[in-house]
Image (cartoon, rainbow, N blue to C red):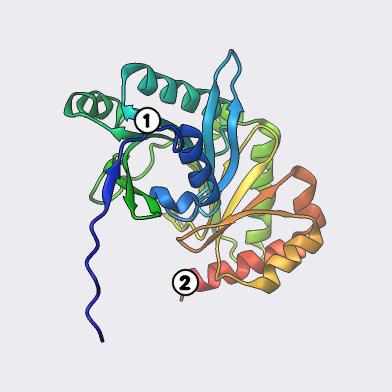
Amino acid sequence: MSELEFTKFEQVNLKNHPVYNEKWVQKKISDDPSILGLGDLILLNEELIQPGGGRLDLLLYDSENEQRYEVEVQLGKVDESHIIRTIEYWDIERKRYPQYDHIAVIVAEEITGRFLNIISLFNGHIPLIAIQMKTLQCGQKITIDCTKILDRIELGGPEPPPPPADRSYWEKKASPATVTIADEILKLIHTFAPNFALNYNKGYIGLMENDRANNFAYFHPKKKFLRLSIKLRKSEQFESQLDEAGLEMISYSKSGRYKIRLYKEDVEKNKDLLTEALRESYGKATE
């Protein structure tokens, strides 16, 4: 194998560049969001008008993990107004679409130690990522290099069990009607495993068998529907069955779970399909 030729790239400051400006950077990111180094994201919107004024530069989506990224780009040094605007847009979007996890992202050419400390103060309370970008040129070629200098805080160690709750908690948080969808699914489970009961936590409604947690499936009731998370191997056949039944598959997670949106009438209409999926998931969990 021949030795690769070393090439030196020259850093280009875009703050006052006549051609490569903020719009150019946004266009490159929107064409290929992987530039940011945040995984396999898709572009949902750009220059998204916000209630009360202002425009969100980029709205990106991670379909596997149901996460939305509110991205603001700034040339030159990051400043207070840019940080505040990023957090404001993140807050607006998470309130408009609470069914998703939302992450604020600041992208700037320079993030000084002072502002990194300020951003760090928010992190832990607000899921916030800071990315420093460099534009590099070599001859007639130019590229953008992004470095994540502050990631959202992920707590280490074993995850503690979610705080306990009760049925009334979920009826208030979601609605009595959507909580009853969990009851209907529990009835399907009872056809092959009669010792299960619902286990109410603040994060989700789980399952218990003989007073021991067994969350091969668990539930997130919302105001108008329930999200079923069920552990199954990824299957094109199952996804086709969901599609034919008119059931919406929200995503398939990295942890091997299908997330399915269910309305009240869906369980009765599709009880055979759902029962078989639950039975298969339970069987895998007890192997």
Q: In this orientation, does residue 14 appear?
A: yes
The residue sitting at the bottom extreme is: 1
Identify the image quadrant of residue 171. Answer: top right
Q: Earlier in the sequence, mark 2 or mark 1?
A: 1
User: At x 38% / y 37%, what residue is drawn?
Assistant: 163
Q: Which mark is residue 168?
A: none
| Camera-side residue of 39 and 261 | 39
Question: What mark, if any, has residue 286 been given in the picture?
Answer: 2
- Is residue 91 positioned above or below 62 on the image? above
- Position of residue 42 relative to residue 131, above or below, is below
Quadrant of the image containing the N terminus: bottom left
Residue 148 visible in the current orientation:
no
Measured in 3D between alpha carbons, the distance from the residue under mark 2 to the one under mark 1, in whole angstroms, is 54 Å
Of badges 2 and 1, the one in the foreground is 1
Circle 1 SS class: strand
- At x 58% / y 37%, what residue is drawn? 99
Residue 139 on image: x %, y %: 34, 55
The residue most toward the front is 139
The amino acid type of the residue labelled 2 equals Thr
**What amino acid is found at the position of numbered circle 1 in the picture?**
Leu
The x, y position of residue 283, in whole percent, is: 54, 73
Question: Which mark is drawn over residue 75?
Answer: 1
Q: Where residue 130 sits: x, y (%)? A: 32, 36
Q: Nearer the viewer, residue 54 or 167?
A: 54
Q: Nearer the viewer, residue 116 or 109?
A: 109
Query: Badge 2 local density, few (<14 within 10 Å), some, or many (20+)?
Result: few
